[in-house]
Image (cartoon, helix red, strand yellow):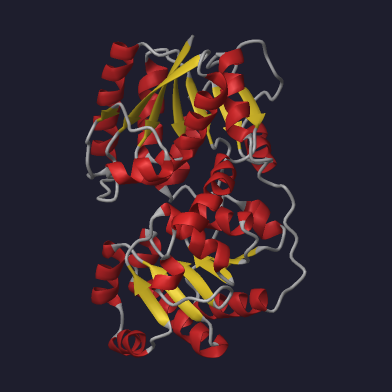
Amino acid sequence: MKKILTVIGARPQIIKASAISRAIETKYADQISQIIVHTGQHYDENMSSVFFEELGIPVPNYNLAVGSSSHASQTAKIMEGIESLIEKENPDAVLVYGDTNSTIAASLAASKIGTPVIHVEAGLRSYNKSMPEEINRILCDHTSTLLFCPTNAGIKNLAKEGFDLTDKDKATIDHPIVYECGDIMYDNSMHFSQLSDEKSNILAENNLQKEQYILVTIHRNANTDDVTNLNGILSALIQIQENTSLELILPLHPRTRKMMDSLLSPEITQKLKDNKAIKIIDPAGFLDIIALEKNARMIITDSGGLQKEAFFFEKPCVILRPQTEWVEIVENGNAILTAADESKIIAATMDLLNKYDFTFPALFGDGKSAEFIVQKIIEKI
């Protein structure tokens, strides 16, 4: 039986990992086992037992509890902890997701002691190396043995970087194997959509009507910590609400609220207080976010995950970033990049609200990517 050590560092990665756990449990339990390690990179007070029970997600076997610190310090602590666990558990491979410090730290620790690395969400590129995530993506891919790309764009990016795309009997770090597998978050969005319908009351709690509001999220430091960018975004949102009469709901992290308190101009702060159609609420849980996404008229976000989920639920999206790793949704006309430019945000929102010829091709797979990934791990590692 194969044994993998799965490393996650934040709540979104646990949700991603749940797709692999379901696939193992339902189809491959006699061929592969999994040890789950939470690095503790992001402390989340919502990471209670209720969270795992509600979503049916396995509780991590280990928590390294590294906490927040500088990139170098955090990465070093995770590497040390993962190396120790690899020696203790002796897995056949280490599986990582995405582009966090947990991702790159586990990849470096494993590859340096000869343990194969499996990278889910490989091949993504924003082509902006000022983003720490971009550095993590590139380095993780180049230390990996099995690489699973959610879309064809990832395959093309890896080909540009010299990866041999031919299949092989077995994968090694010197001769890795690359697959296009679809997106496991599409698997999850489809799986948890029905559960969200059954359990989420967030629309009723906030007096929201289907298709009569815009969902907005802001969390990236480039937007929250820059006085010009933060004021530009909030000013645009106020004007959008006034121009469209749609309500806006913003589930915001306490840190973002704190930055708004310290950086927003008195005029914008007052307008936000006076406008009852702009509803700022606490961070929403995964099932609540799905409910908000499914029922929104459109989505405005700087989150990579919400960009995709907007597409999954067939909603147009304004992306508050200068570039995106999910280029397909922009090229297909479902999303528009605006960065934090006030006039561009307003123009893009109005363009998308007035567009009705959207298409939603199967860019992210068939909802069975996790099964494909697990099968290839069993065959190729």
* Frontmost residue, 298 versus 119: 298
Q: Quadrant of residue 178?
A: top right
Residue 129 position, x and y percent, is 47, 47
The relative height of residue 27 versus residue 228 in the rendered view (above or below) is above
Residue 320 seen in the figure = no
* Frontmost residue, 320 versus 192: 192
Query: Residue at coordinates 52% horizontally, 68% vertically from top-left?
Result: 300
Residue 143 position, x and y percent, is 48, 24
Query: Residue at coordinates 52% horizontally, 83% vertically from top-left?
Result: 240
The relative height of residue 129 versus residue 32 in the rendered view (above or below) is below
Residue 297 seen in the figure = yes
Residue 4 position, x and y percent, is 44, 19
Residue 281 position, x and y percent, is 34, 70
* Frontmost residue, 287 versus 151: 287
Query: Residue at coordinates 40% horizontally, 14% vertically from top-left?
Result: 91
Task: Point out the residue furthest to the right here.
Answer: 357
The relative height of residue 162 versus residue 57 in the rendered view (above or below) is above
Q: Quadrant of residue 329?
A: bottom right
Q: How many marks?
A: 0
